[in-house]
Image: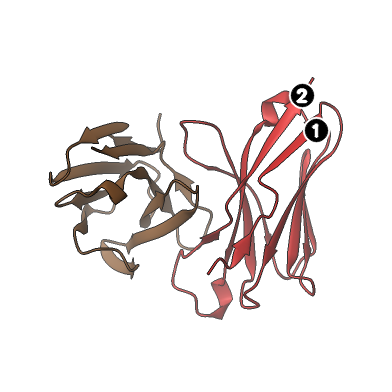
Chain colours: A red, B brown
Amino acid sequence: DQQVKQNSPSLSVQEGRISILNCDYTNSMFDYFLWYKKYPAEGPTFLISISSIKDKNEDGRFTVFLNKSAKHLSLHIVPSQPGDSAVYFCAASAINRGSTLGRLYFGRGTQLTVWP
Amino acid sequence: DTAVSQTPKYLVTQMGNDKSIKCEQNLGHDTMYWYKQDSKKFLKIMFSYNNKELIINETVPNRFSPKSPDKAHLNLHINSLELGDSAVYFCASSQGYNEQFFGPGTRLTVL
């Protein structure tokens, strides 16, 4: 049973425009969310995170928005660059709800392609 | 300097064999993990160790056995390999609940 879902397997965006990657979750106990980026033949690399006490977190071109009532988060990349082309994984954890240390639940990933 | 390293990067072997994948982290983290990414691209946790103590042990066949000789190492031993074990295995580490850092992955192919 997938508790974290990324329903779009792929997204194609022109360079310079905004990329919006979406993620939904079902477990209301989740209180910490992360985005990872993965290039082929490499491991996932941490990109940005957000705690459930916030609804927005920004780091340079990357912004994550959290809508707890809808159990939805999104990652915005502005402006998109060809080097952003990768698979983006959404992950969630229940840090303050007694979750086992380090247990992350991952979505299936969205392949982002940024074309010139 | 590589933060989380795994060896080997590729592993091709016959059914029934026993193999090991090694993982080392030089970040000083106290928690290490093994994940499996299957053909459907799902990343699922298999095991985690905190200060050499097993704290997550998902429902995986007991043919899989993790071993943590010290906080910087977490190895994965797999006995009697089966076709369904073919996948990419990722090692990761973290300091407590902070974000996890992943290794480059080991692509295991069982023939």
**Nearer-the-camera pick, A72 or A47:** A72
Say which residue appears at 62% left-offset and 75% top-offset: A27
Provide the residue designation for mark 1: A13
Q: Chain of mark 1?
A: A
Q: Position of residue B71 (x, y in %)?
A: 28, 54
Give the amino acid type for the residue marked by disc 1 in the picture.
Answer: Val
In terms of secondary structure, where does tag 1 sit?
strand
**Label 1 vs 2, first from the N-terminus:** 1
- Residue occupying the point 36% across, 55% down: B32
Q: Tell me if I can see residue B57 in this picture.
A: yes
Q: B67 or B19: nearer the eye?
A: B19
Query: Which of the chains bears the disc numbered 2?
Result: A
Left or right: A84, with B39 as reference point: right
Q: Which disc, if any, is residue A115?
A: 2
Placement of A23 over or under B59, stated as above or below? above
Whole-Å distance between the Cαs marked 1 and 2?
Answer: 6 Å
Quarter of the image for the C terminus of chain B: give it. Answer: top left
Q: Farthest top residue? A: A116
Asked whether the beta carbons under mark 1 and mark 2 sit within 8 Å of each other, the answer is: yes
